[in-house]
Amino acid sequence: MATEVDFRDKLDEMEKAFKSMPSYMGGCIAAEDFSLLGKAMGYERTEEEIQTTIKYWMEHHNGKLELKQFLGLVSQAHDTSELGREYALLADKDKNGFIDSAEFVDIATLMQTHDARLKGKSFDDFVNEADTNLDGKVSIDECVIWIRKNLHNENK
């Protein structure tokens, strides 16, 4: 069983890999280094997954990934609920606690890098499925539950 020390060591290794990227500057790397970063960390991704990830960061985050964002995402990768929370918080650009249509596109695009079967989900689908209190809005918590249900087709 992994211990907290083992996990901290793993995060330290990931941070070291991140900082070794050719574009590393000011706590960020360029999206173009994602393939190299994945290889440095031993992740196997298809070329399509890599290109989708790069496109997402280019379109939604100015082609940059911050070290803090990266460590937050990789530290939660084993827990769909926590990974969903990281995705939702990352997408909630106006920090109002709700996911609007533009922010949904952000989340849906990022989730598609993990599961291409999510292509075609519309914002209306998202609201209909995620808005459990029927107030016409999707809160961060509702979004996390929706992500958990949809990522890797859990509960289907």
Image (tube, helix red, strand yellow):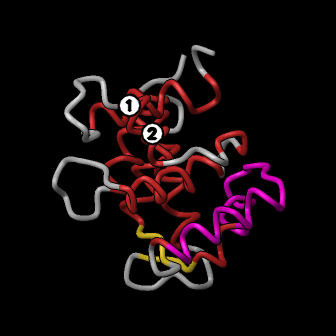
Callout 1 amino acid: Ala
Q: Secondary structure at mark 1?
A: helix
Residue in the foreground of this view, choosing between 135 and 88 = 135
Q: Which range is magenta?
A: 35-59
The disc placed on residue 154 is: none
Q: Is residue 108 above or below residue 35?
A: above
Residue in the foreground of this view, choosing between 155 and 129 = 129
Residue 103 among those drawn in magenta: no
Q: Is residue 155 above or below residue 41?
A: above
Q: Is residue 27 above or below residue 108?
A: below
- Say whether marks 2 and 1 touch (CB < 8 Å): yes
Residue in the foreground of this view, choosing between 1 and 47 = 47
Q: Quadrant of residue 3?
A: top left
Q: Position of residue 119 (x, y in %)?
A: 67, 48
Residue 47 among those drawn in magenta: yes
Q: Residues within 10 Å of mark 2 (few under 14, many from 20)?
A: some
Q: Is residue 10 left or right of residue 41?
A: left
Residue where numbered disc 2 is placed: 126
Residue where numbered disc 1 is placed: 130
